[in-house]
Amino acid sequence: MDHLRAEGWTILAHRARTAWGEIDIVAIRDGLLVFTEVKARASIMQAGDAISPRTMQRLMNAAQGLCMLNAGWVYDGMRFDVVVVLPDGHMHRIEDAFRME
């Protein structure tokens, strides 16, 4: 999260629990609300495989629930990112990894 703060993001929630599941990080910057799923995997490909359609739906439902519960969040847009933590500790962020349809 320190990396996100260093990039100018404000962390709104960490491990936000909802009836639909947990969102690892919710952050905002310049009117963009980002819901981030963090996956520790051996490779970026394995992390991608871990984000199934069911996982995406769960995250989208949880995001909608959080937005309803936090009416004070003011944003112009939103996206879903995935952060992959590799075994050597390096992190790779996949911005706009999937979208709500």
Image (cartoon, rainbow, N blue to C red):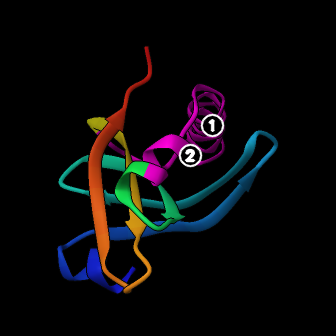
Q: Tell me if mark 1 has few (under 14), some (14-19) or many (20+) residues whose alpha carbon lies within 10 angstroms of its own.
A: few
Q: Position of residue 4 (x, y in %)?
A: 29, 74
Q: How far apart are marks 1 and 2 (CA)?
A: 8 Å
Which residue has dot 2 on it?
Answer: 50
Q: Nearer the viewer, residue 74 or 93?
A: 93
Q: Is residue 45 above or below residue 20?
A: below
The answer to whether 95 appears left or right of 67 in the picture is left
Mark 1 vs mark 2, foreground winner is 2
Question: What residue sits 23% from the left and 47% below the top?
Answer: 31
Q: In this view, does 58 lie above or below 38?
A: above
The answer to whether 39 appears left or right of 2 in the picture is right
Name the quadrant of the N terminus: bottom left
Q: Nearer the viewer, residue 36 or 89?
A: 89
73 within the magenta span? yes
Which dot marks residue 55? 1
Question: What residue sits 47% from the left and 52% below the top?
Answer: 46
43 within the magenta span? no
Magenta region? 46-75
Q: Where is residue 71 in the image (x, y as percent from the top left)?
A: 54, 42
Name the quadrant of the C terminus: top left
Question: What residue sits 50% from the left and 62% below the top?
Answer: 38
